[in-house]
Structures are given as structure tokens and as C-alpha cells.
Amino acid sequence: MEELSADEIRRRRLARLAGGQTSQPSTPLSTPLTSPQRETPPGAPPGPSGAVLQPPPPAPSNSLGLAVHSVTPATSPVGAAGVPYRSQSSEGVSSLSSSPSNSLETQSQSLSRSQSMDIDSVSCEKSMSQVDVDSGIENMEVEESDRREKRGLGDKESSSGSEVSEEQALQLICKIFRVSWKERDRDVVFLPSLAAEFRQNPKDVCSGFKDLISQILMEVLMISTQGRDDNPFASLTATSQPIATAKSPDRYLVLNPSSSQGSSPMFASAGSFGASSLSSLGASGGGGASDSASDRFTIEPCKETEMLNYLMERFDSVGMEERKAPKMCSQPSVSQLLSNIRSQCISHAALVLQGSLTQPRSLLQQSLLVPYMLCRNLPYGFIQELVRMTHQEDDVFRQIFVPILQGLALAAKECSFDSDNFKYPLMALAELCEIKFGKTHPVCNLITSLPLWCPDPLSQGTGREIQRLSYIGAFFSLSVFSEDDPKIGDKYFSGPAITLENTRVVSQSLQHYLESARGDLFKILHNILLNGETREAALNYMAAVVNRNVKKAQMQTDDRLVSTDGFMLNFLWVLQQLSMKIKLATVDPFYIFHPRCRLNVTTDETRLKATMEDLKSWLEELYKDPSKFSEPKFPTECFFLTLHAHHLSILPGCRRYIRRLRAIRELNRTVEELKNSESQWKDSPLATRHREMLKRCKTQLKKLVRCKACADAGLLDENLLRRCLQFYGMVIQLLLRIVDPAYPSVTLPLNPEIPKVFAALPEFYIEDVAEFLLFVVQYCPQVLYEPCTQDIVTFLIVFICSQNYIRNPYLIAKLVEVLFVTNPAIQPRTQRFSEMMENHPLSIKQLVPALMKFYTDVEHTGATSEFYDKFTIRYHISTIFKSLWQNIAHHGTFLEEFNSGKQFVRYINMLINDTTFLLDESLESLKRIHEVQEEMKNKEQWDQLPREQQQSRQSQLTQDERMSRSYLALATETVDMFHILTKQVQKPFLRPELGPRLAAMLNFNLQQLCGPKCRDLKVENPEKYGFEPKKLLDQLTDIYLQLDCARFAKAIADDQRSYSRELFEEVISKMKKAGIKSTIAIEKFKLLSEKVEEIVARNSQSEIDYSDAPDEFKDPLMDTLMTDPVRLPSGNIMDRTIILRHLLNSPTDPFNRQPLTENMLESVPELKERIQMWMREKQQSGQQSL
């Protein structure tokens, strides 16, 4: 190389640089590589002398309660917190002052003789290169000569101020680049070509520092490329620590061993830190040595790496010189020189990354910079400057940054929450996306231009595809759910040492991890949205995630076809952050009907009120006038994307959580049954099968419990649930504004004309709110108290009291269930919420009548399961009524409804029906339980039964026990309501269509409790089933006494099925024996019994047989003599009492099922007169026969 002329060297250098660009002086960059929001801000406060004060070493970090000790090399550019603001401390490189000719102190001293200057405290803020970045650097041991040099700079710099000479500039260049063209030395790289050029014509070489810098860098890099086994940077070993050795506290940058680089200071092996460091790291859960050596975190040992290390250290040396002598470096000539050095380092690094100096690199190869970025190990400002200098040349920019983006995505796919390595790919990408020049985010532009930004669907599994194939899908896939990442459960929630407290601490730590990761995900997507050129692409991607996961809302979903719960919850969290500051006034409720709506809301989606025909006609009308639509704005689009994302993320997660709890309960029950019955099967031929089943159940139970623990961390996250509740508060406000524009001053009843936009909204807009509230109240009630709680109470009352606004009765039932579960009797921790509901102004006047109406309406819901569903719904309403009755503010409304309410009579009828069925079923199941228990007591007889019959009887026993518990709970609630109501009001219960049925129901149940077969109800542990016979008898006899009157006594006497004098005598005897009632109450009951007996006696004397009445005098349904015939619209004639009783159950004509009400009945006086005449004739003939 020494034989080449200077011109030839320059020509070759320029040819090599053809793909790069020279740069103007660097301008300050707004975004550091390491986000100041996460890391310690660069710069420590100056001390009294102007020197930067070094902070003390930070305390060891903690991961899930386990200490992870920081091991950072003395000259590391990363502090203990992993802050990569610099590669070396101010004191860290003693070699830079080892030679007098290279000492910047000498230059500073010579300048101080010419002019003295005051230290300008603002000068360091004028360029990126002058940012003080000592914060976070550990205290380092330095040689005494370095300390003297720094003190000398501090003492003498104040008097420096003259222009730097050419010789001093050359010395500065040599010092920064660690090169020499005068003599060979172990501390520098000797440049023979440049030395030859200096010997020939030194003035030409020094004519332009920019060319000189370029020539120095090119020759150094060319020496590296041409060297075979020799490392050209080996001579720097004694005086420099390599950038490669720097590491964050829990991730070590590891290089694959290679004989050719064994002595290179640019490479470090794991052994550099000592075996104890790695072993302690592995023990702490931060990742073991093998994990540290992951390909993504490992620097590739090659020539390009040597060059990059050299260029990065030279880039960082500029900043170190500026910190040592800020006044001198702020001089225009020196500042320009340092800026050129920085720019040239970046330009040559770009050439290295493209492979221009060695071998062209494919876009499929991982970038050499990725390990540095993952390890938080780049010099401060390096990556920002690289983006700035390359983003305007698209080909160069893509060739450098596409491999970087791919490498980060691959690293993200391999990361997990089983160690805190997950954060590095996220942090790196977030900081790349934050880099901004003007209004442009270059990396955001590049990301959205990638083919895999939002790939087209290839199969039916569109949801899983967009997660697995889209670029940022890998970053959003981090999850704590065991189904998504089994390593989480295996690491944190397995082993005998796991306790409830440990689980809680681990869950909190995992939630902290999630919050950190989601914060970076938000930065990534937020910056892509902020960038005007990529906003549309970001919105398209967000809509694609929602639209391709619509199957996730189905009750039965193939999880292989949709995105995972972890992915969707991460996506939801980001959308929640984007929606936090949206003002509802800017949200257009017509958006989902807009022709340009990004969401795919199909026409077969169930709507709140509109049928498919209603929806179709309204949309046709709407689309005829495009002026009704406004241009979709970002707040509207973001709001509805977030709403639909809740539907596909948090709600499916809640359902899965509840299903898992149910499965755990079932498995626990199975295990207990197998254990309890072991004595029966251990010697049987089925013993082996039962043992295998027991083993499988226990294994599955452990797995499910582990999955639940993971789900507790991922789903029962109070911060996440609070954000969901706050967003649903916004949804509630929007819905209330639609139905009543006067919101928040809502009045009831609402306008009978339902707004069409409300009627056409998807049903899940309200259903999701109810489901989420049900989940929160049961599993995380402390979340419920937020500023939006008052809106939630208003929302529940308004829609429960406006049942005409919602077509689906089961949706109203869910809203009622929310009131039920917040009742203090069910969930004591929601007492304040319950009080807010009870004392709400709208509740006091409207809630009781609305609930009473709904109690009767659920008799017919249209569902195949309506018969059984109604019992649960009515149980909820009865519980709410009992609570409201205890609030004196509601007494007036109750009494008004009792006396004149249109629904009250129907309500009593349903109450009688339910009590009759529930008590009958529960008492019958108790009889069957008694029968099996008696059989099992007789061991000899039981053992004689075939094994199959024994198992069948045991299975039936289990089923009866479950049924008995359920029915008795419902029956007890209805009897309680009867007890309360008959105490307050009696008249409605004595109506002709109700009194006889009520008396018959009471008589029948008294017979069950006190009749000859009452012993069949005696079971072991009756409290296990909620069976309290004494309390039940006490309540039933109370109802008799509360309704005691002549009309009720006649109704009792007319019941020929269950009433008998002996029955009432037995009841009185049992009440006396058990002390159920006071003596006075027993005497009252005895008097009632006597009145009934008198009526029975009179009836028997005057009994006349009317069975031979003409058919036209008989009711066509009951075949009994009519006393008050009425004509139906269908033309049929029925007895008024019978048709009214029918209408209480079903408001339809029994002959054609057409709607029918009481005011549609027409009296038939002519027929009534004829019937009465026939009855008189019958009575007269009867008397004559006597």
C-alpha cells in the first residue's frame, strides 16, 4: 500500500465512498436511543467546580422478588440501569492521554495563554455532541495520571479561547481515531498510505479535514478487510475497553469464540464477567448462560463487527472530548471538525452495514447492529444519526434498516416473560419509531411499507395469521397466559413452595412486566399514527386485527383460527390509551353505518331493537342522502375500534376464565367422589381404571390451577380492568346521549319513539357492558368505584325501566342480574354501589314497577329454555325487591303498585305458579334423597345390589342433591316474597281468579310438611340442601294468618284435594311441639281452622250436582258450569274467572293464540240469565227430593 501515490489513494477512497454521503454538521436530535421516560435522564448535576458528579452505583434490581445483580465493566458505556448514553466515562480511557503529542490538555494549555474564557453553562446544550451523559455511569477506577489530566483540564480550560491551530486539529483527529502516520505505536493504528502521502506533500493532505477524516477511516477499514489472521485493532488492547463488553444488568452480550479474534479488544466472551455472575443470573430467573447466548443477543464474529466496533468507539470518543473540554470544543472550527468526524463515522458505518467494504449483505440476513440494540449498547445518538443520514436515500435506508427491523421481530418472537429479556426488542423498536425529523418518522414509514405490515389473509384462520405474520404481531404476542406461553406457568406457578402470598407477589410482578411492555407497544403504534404518511396504514392494520378476529366473540371458538388472548389484550391496552382523551362530542354514532366504515359489521348482527327488515329499510333510506354522513375523523374511528376490540378481547377472556373455574370445580368434585368411594371400588375389577382416572384428574387439576394463576395475572389486573370500566363509562354516556339528548338530565319514561340509530346498534354494545360488570363485581369488586360509577347506575336503571327499547328479554335479564350481584346480600363489597342504585332519583319512582312487569314478562321469552330460565331471573328480582323494601324511600312506590298497579295481580299469579312448582320439585327431590340414604344405611341390603345399580343410585343421588339445592333456594325466595307481600296487602290475593289457587297451593304444601308422608322428607344434613322445615312451616302458617278472612276461609274449604280437618290439627300439634309460634298465633290459626270447618259443613249440606248441565252452560276449557259467561273476539264463550286466570299466565286467546286482554271480553247477559234460571230450577228440584 505504501507504493501507491497519494492521488491513487484518494481516488480509490472516493470510489469506495460513492454509495455513502458526507454530512453537514450534526444538529441536535430530539430522541435519544434510550427513552428518557424509561431510563435515567442523561447528565448529572455539575459539582461546585463544574465537573460532572457521578451518581452512586444503583441498588440491585429485583425481578419477581429475586435480586439480579448488575455486572457492568469499568469502561462500559452502559450504566447499572442499562443506560447507553456513552461508551466510556470521562475517566475511562487513560490511553488517550498517554502520549504528550496526543494530549488535549496540551492544546488546552496553549489556548489558555492567549485568551481566558468563562465557563458557559449553556454551551453544552447547543448541539447533540455536547449533551452531558454521565448519568448512570458506575464509578470507575482510573490511573492517577488520568485524574491529574482531568483536573488540569478543569483548572485551565477557563482561560482558553483562541483558535485551534492546524497542528492541534491534527492531534485531535489522531487522538480520536487512535491513528498515527508518523510512527508505529502499540496504542495506535499506523496508516502507511497516509504516512506516504504526508511525506510527499503534507500541505495537500491537510487542505481539507473532511477528506482527511474520510481517508483515515477508509484506510483503517481497508486494513481491517485486507487482514487475514491479524487484528488491526489488537494494538489498542492496553488502553481501551471494547463497546462489546457493555451489558444491561440481566443480559450479557456474548461473542462466539474464534481463534482469529481471540485477542481482539472488540470482542468479549462470557468469561469476561466470571462464571459466578452468570450462575447467579440464572438462579435469579433473569435468564441463564445458555439463554444469554441466544443468537439474537450474540454479536457475529466477523470483519464487519470489528469495523463497527471501531467506528462506534470513535463516534463516542467525540462526545468524550467534548465533555472534557466543552469550551474549546464549542469553538466553530473545532465543533465543525467534531461534527465531520461524527458524520464520517456514520457514513462509513452505513457502508459497513451494507457490506460495501466487504461482501454485500442480503436483506434476509440479521443486521450486525441488532445485538447492540438489544443489549442497549450503542453510543448515544449513533442510531439517530444513522437514520438522519440515510433516510433520504430509500435504497440505502432500506438495505440498512430492513434487516434491523427483521432482527428485532425475530428477537421478539423468541422472547417471553419468563425473563425480562422481553423488553429489549420492544424498547429498541419503540425508540426507532420515535426518531423524528421535521414531521416525518422515517422508521415508521419503512415499517408500514414492509410486505408483512398487514398481509392479506391466506386461510380461514385470519386472526391467527395476522398475529403470526404481520410485522408488529410478534411484539404484540407477549403474554402471561399459560395457553399462549406454557413457560410462564412452569416457571412461576409450579412447585410445592408456591403459596397464596407468593402467587400474589408473582402476579403483581408479571403485571408490572405487562405494563412496561404495553407502554412500548403504545409508543410504537402511537408514533406510526402520529406520522401523517403512515396513519392510514396504522388504522387499516388496527381494523384488520378487529375484523379478522370476529369469531373470537363466538361462544364456541376454534382457538387455532383466532389471535390469542394475550395478543388481543395487548392490542386492547394500546387502543385504550389512544382513546383516553377522546371527547364524546367528537364521536359520530352513525359511524358503523358509514359507507367508509373500516369495521365489518354484518347485517345479520343482532341489533338492539331493529329487526333485519327494519335495518335494511332504514339503511336504504339513510344511503339515499349522503349528506347525513360526516367525514370519519380519527376520534370516531379510534372509539369504535376500541369498543369492538373490547368485544373481542376482554369479554372472551372473562368467559374463558369462568369456564376454567367451572372445570376446576367439576374436577375437584370428581376427585373427591373417587376418593370417597375408594372403599367400594378398590377391590373391584374397575379398580385399575378408577386409579388411572383419579391420576388423570389430579394431573389435569394441577394444570388448570396453574393456568388459572397465569390468568389471574393477565386478566385480574386492576389497572387493566379500571381502564375497561372507564372506557365502558364513555360507551354508556354515548348511549344515554342517543336515547336522551338532554343527558346528563335523563328523565323517565324515555321518548316512546325509539331513535333509529339506537335501534340499529349491535346488541353487544349493551350486553358487553353488562357482562363486564358481572365479571368485575364477582372477581374484582374494588375496581367498581370510579368516577364513571354514577353513569353506570343511571345506565342500568334507564334501560331496565325502558324495556321497550331492547328487543331481547335476556339482555334486560343481564342488566337485572347486575343489580342482583351488587346487592350487599350477595356481594358485601358493593354496598356503596347498591346504595347509589337504590337512592337514585330515577330508581325511587320507576324501578319497582319495571321489575314487576319484567317478572311477569319472562314467562314467555321465546327461547326453548324459557321455563327454567324464568326461575333464575325471578329469583334475582325477588332478591332485589327484598332489598328495596328495606329502603324506606321505596315504600311509597311499593304500596302504590300493590293497590293500583296494573302488573301486581299478574305478578302474584306468577308467584303462586312458581311457588307451587318449586316447592313441589324440591320436596320430591328430598324424598328421593331420603329413599337412597335409607337404602345405603341398610348395608346388607345395599351390598346385595348389583354394582351397576349401586352406581346408578349414587349418580341419581348426586343429581337429586344438586337439583334440591337449586330448587329450594328459589322456592325459599318466592315464599319469602309471599310472606312480605301478604303482610302488607291482602286484597289482590283474594280475587276470584287468585284466591282458590293460592289456598290450594298452601294446603298442598302443608300436607307435604305435616301429612302422613312427611317422614319421607327427613334427610341427613338438611342444611346441606338449604332445607329448613320449621322456617317453611312458620312462613306458610303466617301467610294463612295474614290473609285470614271469610273469603279466604271459603277458598280453603273449597279445596277438596288437600284440605282436611286432620291436616290442620296436625299442623297445630307440630307448631306447639316445635315452639314455632306463640300461643296467641296458634290460637288464631285454630280459630281459622274452625271457620273453615263450618264452611265445609255448610257446603256438604247444600251440595248440588251440576254435572248434568247442558254443554252450552259449561266452560269449554274446564268443563265446569259457568257463572259469568263472556264472549271472546274469536266468538268462543268462556267463564270470566277461568279466562281471567288464563290471561294472568298468557295474554292470548286460548283458541287461536291471538293477543287478548281483559277489556276485549264481552259479557253475555242472555246466557248468564239462562244459566242462573237453570241453577234455580236445579236447586228447587233438589229441595223437593229431600
Image: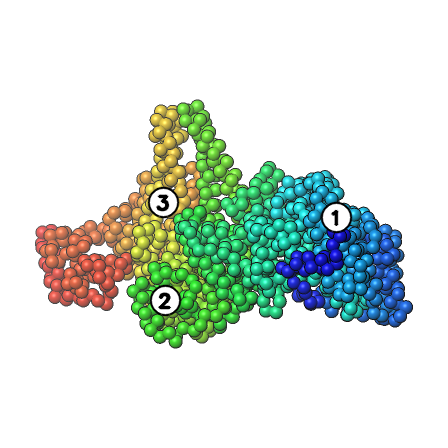
Determine the secondary structure under disc 2.
Answer: helix
Dot 3: what SS? Answer: helix
Dot 1 falls on a residue whose secondary structure is loop
Count residues near mark 2 (Cα–Cα under 10 Å), then give few for <14, some for 14-19, many for 20+: many
Residue matched to label 3: 922
Label 3: how many residues lie within 10 Å, few (<14), some (14-19) or many (20+)?
Answer: many
Residue 274 appears anywhere in the view: yes
Say left or right for 133 vs 442.
Answer: right
Check contact, mark 1 vs mark 2: CB within 8 A. no
Residue plotted at (58% across, 53% down): 403
In the displayed structure, would residue 200 be above or below residue 359? below
Which residue corresponds to the image point at 56% horizontal and 66% vertical from the top-left? Answer: 530
Please tell me which of labels 1 and 3 falls first in the chain.
1
- Percent of width and height locating residue 766: 42, 62
C-alpha separation, residue under disc 1 versus residue under disc 2:
77 Å
Report the mark closest to the observer, 1 or 3.
1
Residue ID for mark 1: 232
Identify residue type, mark 2. Answer: Ala
Relative height, residue 537 to residue 407 (above, below): below
Q: Amino acid at mark 1?
A: Pro
**Nearest the eye: 314 or 927:** 314
Where does label 2 land, which residue? 759
